[in-house]
Image: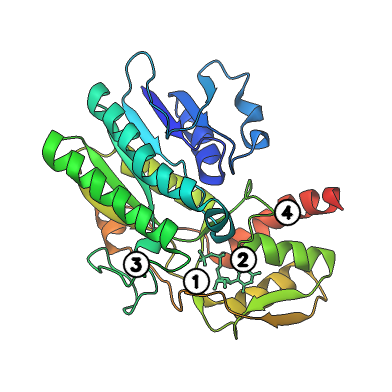
Amino acid sequence: MRVLITGAAGFIGSHLVEKYLKEGWEVIGLDNFLTGKVDNIEEFFSHPNFTFIKYDVTNFLYVKGNLDLILHFACPASPIHYMKHKIHTMKVDSIGTLHALGLAKEKRARFILASSSEVYGDPEVTPQTEDYRGNVSPTGPRSVYDEAKRFSEALSMAYFREHGVDVRIARIFNTYGTKMDLNDGRVIPNFMKQAIQGLPITVFGDGTQTRSFCYIKDMVEAIYRLSTKDGIAGQVINLGNPEELKIIEVATLIKELTGSSSPIEFKPLPEDDPKRRKPDITRAKEILGWTPRYKLKEGLSEVIPWFRERILKKE
Ligand code: UDP
């Protein structure tokens, strides 16, 4: 079996490279290193079933030979990254998705779109089910990502309906683990850095906004199941951990687990920051037989040594 992974050097992409190689697949990884890191995939370069191509999916996309599966994971994903690379983010999730879908059609490959809980914007209902249509500002600062992911979903469904491409859409909620970019501004790497370095932990707003965090090992398993199950073309599935926490609780938990004496400092809440986010994962349970195993406390305890080593090395 042969899989093409776009965004192979990114956080989730690089974990997928590892998983599919372990499962015996031949893996072709693409990344332009806009936000992905060579460090994330270096260990696979010597693997006989891995080929890496430095490439930007907004260019014409073609690979030789057959493909059974395309995992389309290319795209800046953290708010500071997509707000920095606004136009490129929109290109990746329009032109890039178009190219990846065109290739899936040509190769008769199954297609997994890495979509996002951001398609729900600042949700008015909780938990969010796949049927919820969202509350997204089309012109706000996060729109470059939110609307681009919504367009990617619409385009994927158009390829499913018009060309019969076996498309599956993964709406991925906040995920954390090894190989996260320490400088991408997301809450877990930020709090880890601050707690480990003894600096103030920056909570935006009053910290009552919530998120639900999924451990990367659980996420990779969910994506693998989504990609290998037969007979679910056209499915849209939330993937995430429904354990919902306030950001202030996350700060306290990281402080406690790292044994840090950092003070907590409140900073202004960024514009359009979603107030609540919690996935309804009934569909993932029923269709994929998947449910996350790691509670946030367990996952964080497992990754703290990884963060500590890298953070202290950089000091
Ligand atoms: N956040 C925070 N302090 C930080 C970074 C983020 O309080 O140093 C908050 C942010 O305002 C949001 C939540 O943590 O409410 C998650 O932010 P992140 O950037 O990780 O991802 P998002 O879920 O917003 O895409």
**Front residue of 289 and 178:** 178
User: Which label sits in the foreground, 2 or 4?
Assistant: 2
Crowding near the residue tagged with mark 1, few <14, some 14–19, many ≥20 C-alpha atoms within 10 Å: many
Quadrant, the N terminus: top left
Q: Position of residue 313 (x, y in %)?
A: 84, 48
Residue receiving disc 2: 187
Which disc is residue 307 wearing? 4
Report if the beta carbon of the residue with label 3 is closer than 8 angstroms to ligand 1: no
User: Which label sits in the foreground, 4 or 3?
Assistant: 3
Residue receiving disc 1: 211
Report if the beta carbon of the residue with label 1 is closer than 8 angstroms to ligand 1: yes
Q: CA distance from mark 1 to mark 3?
A: 13 Å
Coloration of the structure image: rainbow
Crowding near the residue tagged with mark 2, few <14, some 14–19, many ≥20 C-alpha atoms within 10 Å: many
Q: CA distance from mark 1 to mark 4?
A: 21 Å
Name which of mark 2 and mark 4 comes first in the sequence. Answer: 2
From the viewer's perspective, is residue 97 above or below residue 295? above
**Front residue of 55 and 309:** 55
Residue drawn at x 26%, y 59% is 283
Name which of mark 4 and mark 3 comes first in the sequence. Answer: 3
From the viewer's perspective, is residue 36 above or below residue 204? above
Name which of mark 2 and mark 3 comes first in the sequence. Answer: 3
Residue receiving disc 3: 120
Crowding near the residue tagged with mark 4, few <14, some 14–19, many ≥20 C-alpha atoms within 10 Å: many
Task: State whether residue 10 appears in this view.
Answer: yes
Q: Identify the amino acid type marked 2.
A: Val
Name which of mark 2 and mark 1 comes first in the sequence. Answer: 2
